[in-house]
Amino acid sequence: MGDIAVVSAIFCRYLRNRDSRIRVITMSLSISKFAVATGLATGALVSSFATGNAFAVGFGFETDYFENASPKGDILLKSVTIGDEIIEDFSFVNSAVIDFNDAFDGGNTGAASADKGDNATGGVVQENLSEMDGDVVVANLSTNNLNHIIDTEDEGAFTIDLQFGKSIDNLLIWERGKNSDLGIVALDAAGNEIGEKLTITRNMWLDAGYSIDTTEIDEAQEVGSLGISIFDDLGVESGAVDSIRFFSESGFNGPDWKFVGTDAARVPEPAFILGFTLVGGALAWQKRAKAA
Ligand SMILES: [Ca+2]
Ligand SMILES: [Ca+2]
Ligand SMILES: [Ca+2]
Ligand SMILES: [Ca+2]
């Protein structure tokens, strides 16, 4: 990658992290190329674009997928496009520790549960996930089927810690209905919360371009998406992250989610991956499980 390409990529990334709307990202890309070509000071352009941004965190991305017949069937993630980068190298969840999950007592009680498209192949449907059911969460988050999800009941609260099979630099999040909030915070190896504690509020979801109809609902709902940069949005130092905690509170309106990471090893710039150790999740999880 030449100097200009590197400058352009970094500048685009800077803008992306401040503008979650795809419309604005598209504009930023063309402006950034102009700025590099003409030698304009990028700082002035950045501040003018940052003004008036509705969202303090996250970035927009495009979801490319194969859909099998209907929102009830398989919707297979193929690639995502972030700015001008097409990414096919993903990292999937490989361990889940359920710290807390409201108990299921019939009807609409309880919190996180496993759900899937009515006609989707594979995947798990299960209510009442106890602290022993981390493997059920993994079952639905370790596939590229966007119709294998974790559904949360409307008033439900949970805290679930996830690890990924490979180091990730971005977290891609999809939410069924675009009508729920979701909390995220990084954890260090000792299980302490570090960096920024984020709440993605329901007004922040961007249109993912597809709908799903799962066993929990009777008609298709539009899916929202948002990207989270591990370094920029979670505010953590290189090498500090062991796992990522997701949480819901009773006022969050039951987030219904699918997470996939982007494989950090695809990025040529060492600065983006240096010392980041969100790997070996299964091993760390086993250690924790033994200790518990
Ligand atoms: Ca449920
Ligand atoms: Ca929802
Ligand atoms: Ca259904
Ligand atoms: Ca829900």
Image (spheres, helix red, strand yellow):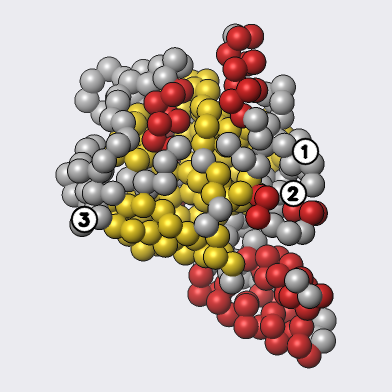
From where the camera sits, is residue 45 visible? Answer: yes
For residue 278, what is the image quadrant?
A: top right
Image coordinates of residue 179 in percent, x first then y, are 37, 49
Residue lying at 51% horizontally and 36% vertically, measured from the top left = 93
Q: CA distance from mark 3 to mark 2?
A: 38 Å
- The residue at 69%/83% (across/down) is 33
Q: Is residue 99 above or below residue 151?
A: above
Q: Residue at x 48, y 44 (%)?
A: 259
Q: Amino acid at mark 3?
A: Ser
**What whole-number distance in Å separates the C-alpha atoms at marks 3 and 1?**
42 Å
Of the numbered discs 3 and 1, the one sitting upstream in the chain is 3
Which residue has dot 2 on it?
A: 273
SS at badge 2? loop
Residue at the spot of label 1:
239
Q: Which residue is mark 3?
A: 70
Image mark for residue 81: none
Disc 1: CA contacts within 10 A as few (<14), some (14-19) or many (>=20): few
